[in-house]
Image (cartoon, grey):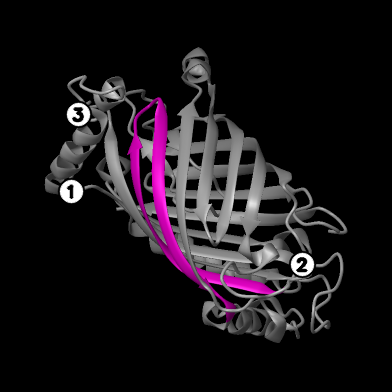
Amino acid sequence: MKNPSKICLIILLLIAFSAGAVEKEDRDAYIIFQLDNDLFTGSDNDYTNGARLALMQPVPEKSLNDLQKFLRSLTGVRGHSVFGKLGSLVESPEIKYDYGIGLSQFMFTPDDPEVLVSGPGQRPYAGWLGAEVSLHAKNKKALSSVVLAIGVTGKYAYAHPTQDWVHINISDSPLFQGWDSQIPTEVTFNLIFDRKRRFNWLADATEDGIIQMDGYFEWGTALGNGITDAYIGSMLRVGYNLPVQYMTPRLQFGNFPHELFSEDRKARADFSIYGFAGCRGIGVLHNITLDGPVFRDFDTGTSSEPFYGELLVGAGVRFKAFTFAVSRTFRSEEFEGQLYSHQFGSILISVGY
């Protein structure tokens, strides 16, 4: 990174903005900022940048009643369907419902900024800009999320002017010359399901120690013309005053730093610091940034690999209603002929209010 001081200044300003956040016990909603960028790892290619600004709030009481009635009709809460056991959870006081909205942008480039059209072994130019709405049901055992993401590729994703502005004003990096060959415009619709189940046995076994541990097992799937895939993975956390939290620091639709207020004194403490590590395996049927649009005739010259994996390591700190986390993701080859695996860094900042 040629000018890290500017990025550090932006991070410090975001931290300063959070100084007026409310006490942890009073927090009901979150503002979240996330950034993925391979400049954090010293490169500038492939998945080169992702940014997201999002808001999560509890479902209002009136809407919650309507939501519970709807879920009850689907699941047969009184035992009149095979989903009766699941439906009985709908009215459980332990279940908390949140909804989220977010705006995200992703950009992808080849290795060489001078090439006008990406060649063999290089990722095609692509950008995506879109919005998401999500619904979440959670307790101390598990988190379930459903997300609708609507976006667009091509020039209306504004990846080209955004990257140029950042490279000129922040990173002092070379300008990429081949954006005219990017994946063309197509409106995308995606429905995403995500499930995380907490390792409560690990949390219970370490809750009395100075250092606590927990984690979760996760699985999910995405369906749509933007991306169709499925994944399984796991995350392990260890730290001091470890909060009851579901969090994936890198960008992911519907991902929020879900935090449940435990009666445990350590989980409710004002200050927490922790490290984490995780892994994920992904099976891909279609990825518009690699395979091209579904409803337009466009040859990207590449094809997505049917399977790839990733490892993630990082650390986080929480003070009252403010959380800051950094991580690094190591991702195996995503497309046929890719010359090497890819790495990128991520930051997550959330403020409760």
Callout 3: 10 Å neighbours few (<14), some, many (20+)? some
What residue is disc 3 on?
A: 91
Residue 153: which quarter of the image? bottom right
Q: Quick one: SS at disc 1?
A: loop
Q: Nearer the viewer, mark 1 or mark 2?
A: 2
What residue is disc 1 on?
A: 60
What residue is disc 2 on?
A: 123
Residue at coordinates 58% horizontally, 43% vertically from top-left? 230
Relative to 136, say whether 334 is above or below.
Answer: below
Relative to 213, say whether 71 is above or below.
Answer: below
Residue 167 lies in the magenta stretch: no
Q: Which of marks 3 and 2 is nearer the N terminus?
A: 3
CB under 8 Å between discs 1 and 2: no
Residue at coordinates 65% horizontally, 36% vertically from top-left? 277
Residue 153 lies in the magenta stretch: yes
Q: Is residue 285 left or right of residue 199?
A: right
Q: Can residue 334 be seen in this view?
A: yes
Q: Nearer the viewer, residue 126 or 46?
A: 126
> Could you say which disc has been placed on residue 222 in the image?
none
Amino acid at pointer 1? Pro
Relative to 252, say whether 209 is above or below.
Answer: above
Q: In this view, does 104 lie to the left or right of 321?
A: right
Q: Is residue 276 left or right of residue 188?
A: right
Residue 219: which quarter of the image? top right
Amino acid at pointer 3? Glu
Residue at coordinates 74% horizontally, 82% vertically from top-left? 176
Task: Please identify the dominant SS of the magenta region.
Answer: strand
Which range of residues does the magenta coloring cover?
125-154
Amino acid at pointer 2? Arg
CB under 8 Å between discs 3 and 1: no
Q: Distance between the residues labelled 3 and 2?
A: 48 Å
